[in-house]
Image (cartoon, grey):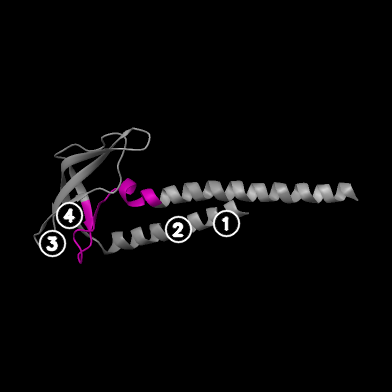
Amino acid sequence: MFFAVLGAALIGAGVHFADATNRFSREASKADGTVVDIETSTDSDGDTMYYPVVEYVSGGDQLIRFRAGVGTSWQLYAVGDTVAVLYSPEDPESARIDAKMHLYFMPVVLWVVGGVFFVVGTATYIIFTFAMARRRRSAQ
């Protein structure tokens, strides 16, 4: 039952993150940005992860530079590529690339992992409950 509850909590967290992302997307200002660099890092498996670094000019004519929060194991962007940017007018440093992968990566991961935990936890609970009931009946 623990895994089912944990799965439900992860699914709920995914819904929360998706709602926050939707709110951010509705309230955000838009700008065109340019990929100015690709930062790399190595993940725990030794694979190289690529993170685009983007510059854009905010509504207040301020040049902002940020690194995307989501990296990929393949180089999705090249230096010089133009990307759509969403940013908070109150905090232009809080910016994201306007692409589904960059906006909804975390909610999708939470939904998938939560769904697996929920299904496995629920199935285990049902199987265990039926097995115990069968054992009680056969003991009588």
The answer to whether the residues at label 4 and label 3 have Cβ atoms under 8 Å apart is yes
Q: CA distance from mark 3 to mark 1?
A: 44 Å
Crowding near the residue tagged with mark 4, few <14, some 14–19, many ≥20 C-alpha atoms within 10 Å:
some
State which quarter of the image contains the N terminus.
bottom right
Judging by the rendered image, the residue that carries numbered circle 1 is: 5
| Residue 21, quarter of the rendered image | bottom left
The answer to whether the residues at label 2 and label 1 have Cβ atoms under 8 Å apart is no
Q: Earlier in the sequence, mark 2 or mark 3?
A: 2
Q: Residue furthest bottom?
A: 90
Q: Is residue 34 magenta?
A: no
Q: Earlier in the sequence, mark 4 or mark 3?
A: 4
Q: CA distance from mark 4 to mark 3?
A: 8 Å
Q: Earlier in the sequence, mark 4 or mark 2?
A: 2
Judging by the rendered image, the residue that carries numbered circle 3 is: 59
The residue sitting at 34% across, 32% down in the picture is 46
Q: Nearer the viewer, mark 4 or mark 2?
A: 2
- Amino acid carrying label 3: it is Gly
Q: Position of residue 30 (x, y in %)?
A: 20, 57
In the rendered structure, find residue 31 and report the number of the disc placed on it. Answer: 4
Q: Earlier in the sequence, mark 1 or mark 4?
A: 1
Between 42 and 20, the residue placed more toward the observer is: 42
Q: Earlier in the sequence, mark 3 or mark 1?
A: 1
Q: Position of residue 44 (x, y in %)?
A: 37, 37
Between 117 and 59, the residue placed more toward the observer is: 117
The residue sitting at 22% across, 38% down in the picture is 77
Q: CA distance from mark 4 to mark 2?
A: 29 Å
Q: Which residues are magenta?
A: 85-106
